[in-house]
Amino acid sequence: MDSKGNLIVISGFSGAGKGTVVKRLVEKYGYSLSVSATTRPPRPGEVDGREYFFKTTDEFRNMIDYNGFIEWAQYVENYYGTPRRFVEDELKKGSTVLLEIEVQGAKNVLAQYPDAILLFITTKDAETLKERLMSRGSETVEQVEKRIRRAAEEAKETDVYEYVVINDDLETCVEDVHAIITARSCERKRRAALLETLKSELQTFAGKGE
């Protein structure tokens, strides 16, 4: 689907800090964030409609039935999905829209939006990832182990991503992601209309000068 805006898909291992990176990009550069829906319970401090739209399993499945998601996936026993209307409205306005979604969902988005930019956020090594998961303190040892196993599976599917960004220092990671988005916005094909206008105007000016 053609759109004026940029669709940015940001994925990453659980514990790599992708949520913090996305939040900082919105704060610093004013990008539009698509809030996902999920059936997982809220973590301490999370607010419905801000971090996620928290849904029951029945509510989520009802949205699936009515084509309410661009993509949805099941991850560690819970469902996650991207509501369709907000994303399409923002792209029509020319906004840069960030989607924080898992690998399965990223593939589904790319199939519908071939021009989407896919970025994968990772830690510098596996040990750092495990330490971050353990330090969160919001999950049991069994849940952390499930996330590690899931990360091992996700690592096999990263070929779909154009860019891999290491989140060792938050601000450096944020700037790297912003630079990628800016570079994509400046591609010649995205400036085609501008170039055609310039050609026409310059020809007019050149003609007047003769």
Image (tube, helix red, strand yellow):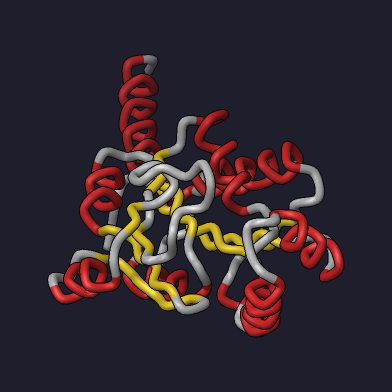
20 relative to 90 in the view: left or right: right
Q: Residue at x 86, y 68 (%)?
A: 127
Q: Residue at x 32, y 40 (%)?
A: 94
Q: Quadrant of the rendered structure where residue 203 is?
A: top left
Q: Position of residue 124 (x, y in %)?
A: 83, 61
Single out the residue that lies furthest toward the front.
140
In this view, the residue in front, 150 or 171, is: 150
3 relative to 170 in the view: left or right: left
Q: Position of residue 87 (x, y in %)?
A: 30, 51
Q: Is residue 192 above or below residue 83?
A: above
Count of picture labels: 0
Single out the residue that lies furthest toward the left.
66
Q: Residue at x 61, y 53 (%)?
A: 18
Q: Is residue 197 visible?
A: yes
123 relative to 140 in the view: left or right: right
In this view, the residue in front, 111 or 18, is: 18
